[in-house]
Amino acid sequence: MDITGSIDMRALRFFLSVFDAQNFSVVARREGVSASVVSRTILQLEDALGQQLFYRNTRAVIPTEAGRLFVNYARTIDNQFNEARQMLLERSLEPSGLIRLNAPVFFGQRHIAPWLAGLSARYPQLEIELTLTDDYVDPHRTATDLIFRIGTLTDSSFHARVLGTQRYYLAASPAYLAKHRPLTGPEALSEHHCLVYRGSAGANRWLFRQGIHPWIHYPVMPLLSSNNADTLLTAALGGMGIVLFPDWLIGEHLQSGKLVRLLEEYESGINTAPQHIAAIYPNTRHPPLHVRAVIDYFVHVYGSPLYWQADTPSSSEVQ
């Protein structure tokens, strides 16, 4: 028979107090209730356990053998509950304990891992676990507290804090631009060397539009395609060809001048829907303090606009 639903912490504490005082009236005065309430609570506990816990007479309340056996378990439960309550109280005051983060591989390497030392210094009681994967992660089915996701937000079953919007830039190195004719428009990409990312769904489509006009797909014949973004980035930096990559991946190279933006009068991308960078967590009314603290930390670190979206030199400024 399952009896756990019939026993609460108040009954256990009344039992422990009566065991120590061996008197209902003393416990009643201490708890601010009547002696009959204490007596009735102990009777309900005995019914739930199916055991008599005390012998009662006019002078004292004496623990039975069952009462002496049960007291050790009751004290353990009470101590564990007090420890858990204290731990939760401490968590509400300062972020602490384990927080499990998940992020895409390259984004995590470039824009999460470098900032973890600062996060740890700010919250020394925080234990951080970071998993990097490009696979889809369901926050309701995996042991993850906070997921950094890049894409279109459509799922209403979780909360999301949007950190920024991902932009795509067409870019090449100054060495490539010095050796090849200027790129006059997207239709001229067929005359240039293109380096294209190829994922599990196939090669990225290169899309362009101007103003409010619709997106147009311009097919390109890649000189190099790869499922590894670092490989393509290294090739582009070496002057091999043109890439279409997100700002967070090539922003630092655009800022340093190692890569140069092309066709700035066009908006470019690989999807027609806006791509957001967001921190998501399961749908809960009150996210834990350590989750809120980590989100706020990265909001501050990334800034507005995002630090990798600073002004970058254009091809006209380089040539």
Image (cartoon, rainbow, N blue to C red):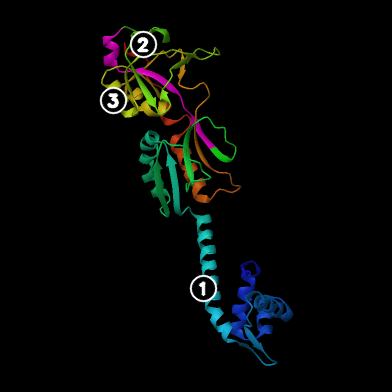
The reply to whether residue 260 is in sight is no
Residue 177 sits inside the magenta stretch? yes
According to the image, label 1 marks what residue?
76
According to the image, label 3 marks what residue?
234
Q: Which mark is residue 316?
A: 2
Disc 3 residue type (three-letter) = Thr
* Figure quadrant of residue 270: top left
Q: Is residue 53 left or right of residue 276?
A: right
Depth check, front residue: 196 or 75: 196
Disc 2 residue type (three-letter) = Ser
Of all residues, the one furthest to the bottom in this rendering is 59
- Callout 2 environment at 10 Å: few (<14), some (14 to 19), or many (20+)? few
Give, as a single range, the part of the protein colored magenta.
161-180
Coordinates of residue 255 in the picture (x, y in percent): 35, 24
Depth check, front residue: 98 or 254: 98
Q: Residue at x 47, y 45 (%)?
A: 294
Q: Residue at x 37, y 41 (%)?
A: 113
Disc 1 residue type (three-letter) = Thr
Coordinates of residue 181 in the picture (x, y in percent): 31, 6
Residue 212 lies, with reference to residue 246, above or below; the image says above
